[in-house]
Amino acid sequence: VSVTFARGFSAAGVAAGLKPSGALDLALLVGAAGTTATGLFTTNKVVAAPVQLARARLDAGHGTAVLVNSGQANAATGPRGAGDALRATDAAAALLHRDSDDVVPCSTGVIGEPIHMPELLAALPGLVDSVAPDGDDDFAHAILTTDTVSKQATATAGQFRVGGAAKGVGMISPNLATMLAFVTLDAAVARGHLSRLADDVLRDTFNSISVDGCTSTNDTVVVLASAAAGGSPVTPGTTAWDGLATAVGAVGESLARQLIHDGEGATHVLLIDVVGAADENDARAVAKAVADSPLVKTAAFGEDANPGRILQAAGAAGVDLDADRLDVWIGDVQVAAGGTIDPDSFAHGGSAARAKPAMAAPEVSIRLRVGDGPGAARVLGCDLSYDYVKINGEYTT
Amino acid sequence: VSVTFARGFSAAGVAAGLKPSGALDLALLVGAAGTTATGLFTTNKVVAAPVQLARARLDAGHGTAVLVNSGQANAATGPRGAGDALRATDAAAALLHRDSDDVVPCSTGVIGEPIHMPELLAALPGLVDSVAPDGDDDFAHAILTTDTVSKQATATAGQFRVGGAAKGVGMISPNLATMLAFVTLDAAVARGHLSRLADDVLRDTFNSISVDGCTSTNDTVVVLASAAAGGSPVTPGTTAWDGLATAVGAVGESLARQLIHDGEGATHVLLIDVVGAADENDARAVAKAVADSPLVKTAAFGEDANPGRILQAAGAAGVDLDADRLDVWIGDVQVAAGGTIDPDSFAHGGSAARAKPAMAAPEVSIRLRVGDGPGAARVLGCDLSYDYVKINGEYTT
């Protein structure tokens, strides 16, 4: 159950033939008339055509439906790619009897390969016909690429429902990376307030996960509010707003964790918590440096409680920190204190040995205290395995 | 032939028992009295004890000999580590009949593990006894850790000779990383001028190689000039200076290339050239982003000419660039023009297919033109293979 858990939304997913595998690859999410929408987008300087069009339409206050294709990312495709995004959404809008501006495009797949437009256009009528309130599972599957499972989440806040679906296994990093996420809610929320909600409770969530540190050309989070639950618009500073924000945040958090668990080749999830930094940005930079370090990631794959690699990564984060103040824990075992690793840690029964079970857990908790400052952050990462190399060494252009 | 190619230097390497393997692990390089020295050091905030002591001694104008141990990095070892670095160099200096300040310490190996001091101190007399003009090969081998081959280079400039040795296979990144390099020359060069020479012709060289983007706690480049070739001091602005700079640069370049060829698990070397950037820093940032991208690195391992991943990495470099101006070549084949990948590139005989032989070469040349600016840079990287994961997943703490 995902994007149609919130009332006022219908969805569908079909196999249009965009993927050589024949799997579902074209998805549509349709909100009731009057749905408001907002988006968060990649920070990569190379931005896919659908991202440019989606951002323009959402910024102008439009967007009641989302058309997603997987198989081709429609990135680095030049004027042809921009034209394809326009033609696809024009065709979908005509079939939905909506304005072209109402349809927001998203694409994911191979960079540089143009969308297979004849197949997409031929499949659109069937896609629009199959849109239904129970189409969320097909939608959630049709947006996937190398994902092994779909990512779906729901939450409630009083009479309001929140639903979400996401995709992404690689090119996921803390600057919004090849990841698409769709969050729906059935409260009435003015467009400007919806944008604030996304900034407040979703941006940091999706900026705090990292599979491989690579920021994609296509990352997009779209949030839609249908007002179908009835009631007057929910506004900031009210109890209803706080409840809604908590529910949206919970859906985002769940999707983010599902994404990282399905990270390409991941056998362990890394939960990197940093406290005591000067501010949240410094804390996140240190946490990201540890989460992205190939040496920490391979140590996690080898289930090796290696405090030196954690210190090395923290020290290279580009943050002004005092190495003599660094405390590190793996699970509940302190493996470095005041920047120093216990000299007996490598001996029989030493801290490295005692921390090994925590390093072998499905979720590896690594905590760093870097000083006395108020800055704290958590970044979710994963290990670097043979399968990451295999998947990305063999994924064909 | 390496550090004793330059006259006025003797060297040795012995097996002190610091490495469990019993391989050579303690090395000494001794310059003639009056030798001048300078150093370049890691930018990591977590700095090993020997780096702190070496920097202090070199900054104070001292340093005629270098004591190197492999097996333990003496990093994150606190006051004990600082004491160990002092005791080791004190003992070596006494045996050499020099001042303690004359001996510069370097360590490489496991972070957090204290140096095995009893073994080191017991081996020092034998090490000093075996110092000889033909000890450079033992020296070059004793400094190695997971390296598979030693790195040695020589060059000449008129009557002057320049030699060098280096180690490092992982934790090598463009901010000077677990890499130790020693360059000797037999010209007379004042200490301040030697420092300038290192800055001018060695800093960029060693900052332009990247195995895994990880900056180490121990990286050090030490340059020593013995004056043993005779003649008056060589000063900037002279023909002799220019010749000497060229020779030192050539030794540095050779060592850097040997390091990257021996990168952990590397099966391909990446030569990333960026031109047209606003300045050299921007060019290097883009080249480093491409060289360090796990997606580019796994594509190289898979010998997959994947222009989308190169564009993605360039776009995420944190540099202000115009995506519509990006041109990319793999070998001699242009795979992206004006930010657009030829739509037929994935078809039979398309650019991706034509670029595949270049992607399969031992040295893969990837060139990017990012605009019309004067900034250009080259970064050397390597691919990300199963063996990188194996080596770093199994390398024990």
Image (tube, coloured by chain):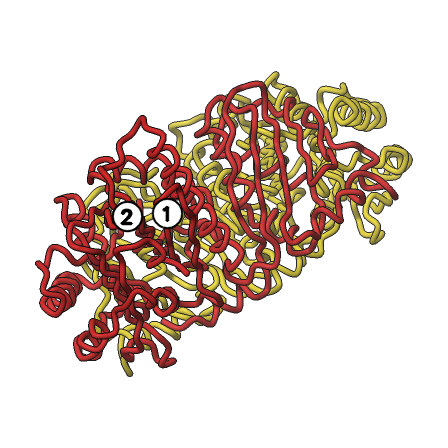
Chain colours: A yellow, B red
Name the foreground residue: B341 vs B258.
B258
Q: Residue furthest top?
A: A60
**Which residue corresponds to the image point at 61% horizontal and 59% vertical from the top-left?**
B267
Bin the neighbour count of mark 1 within 10 Å (Cα to Cα): few under 14, some 14-19, many 20 and up. many
Say whether residue A292 is visible. Answer: no
Label 2 resides on the chain identified as: B
Indicate which label's residue lies in the foreground, 2 or 1: 2
Q: Amino acid at mark 2?
A: Ala
Residue B317 x/y as whole percent: 51, 35
Q: Is residue A168 above or below residue B374?
A: below
Label 1 resides on the chain identified as: B
Say whether residue B328 is visible. Answer: yes
Instruction: Report the side of B148 relative to B238 (left or right).
Output: right
Location of the C terminus of chain B (image quadrant): bottom left
Residue A92 x/y as whole percent: 81, 28
Quadrant of residue B150 within the rendered picture: bottom left
Numbered circle sitting on residue B229: 2
Label 1 SS: loop
Tag count in the figure?
2
Mark 2 vs mark 1: tell me if same chain.
yes
Q: Amino acid at mark 1?
A: Leu
**Which residue corresponds to the image point at 50% horizontal and 40% vertical from the top-left?**
B288
Location of the N terminus of chain B (image quadrant): bottom left
State the separation of the CA atoms marked 2 and 1: 30 Å
Bin the neighbour count of mark 2 within 10 Å (Cα to Cα): few under 14, some 14-19, many 20 and up. some
Residue B389 x/y as whole percent: 53, 64
Numbered circle sitting on residue B176: 1
Label 2 SS: loop
Q: Is residue A62 above or below residue B310?
A: above
Residue B272 x/y as whole percent: 57, 40
Q: Are marks 2 and 1 in contact (CB under 8 Å)?
A: no
Instruction: Report the side of A271 relative to B60 (left or right).
Output: right
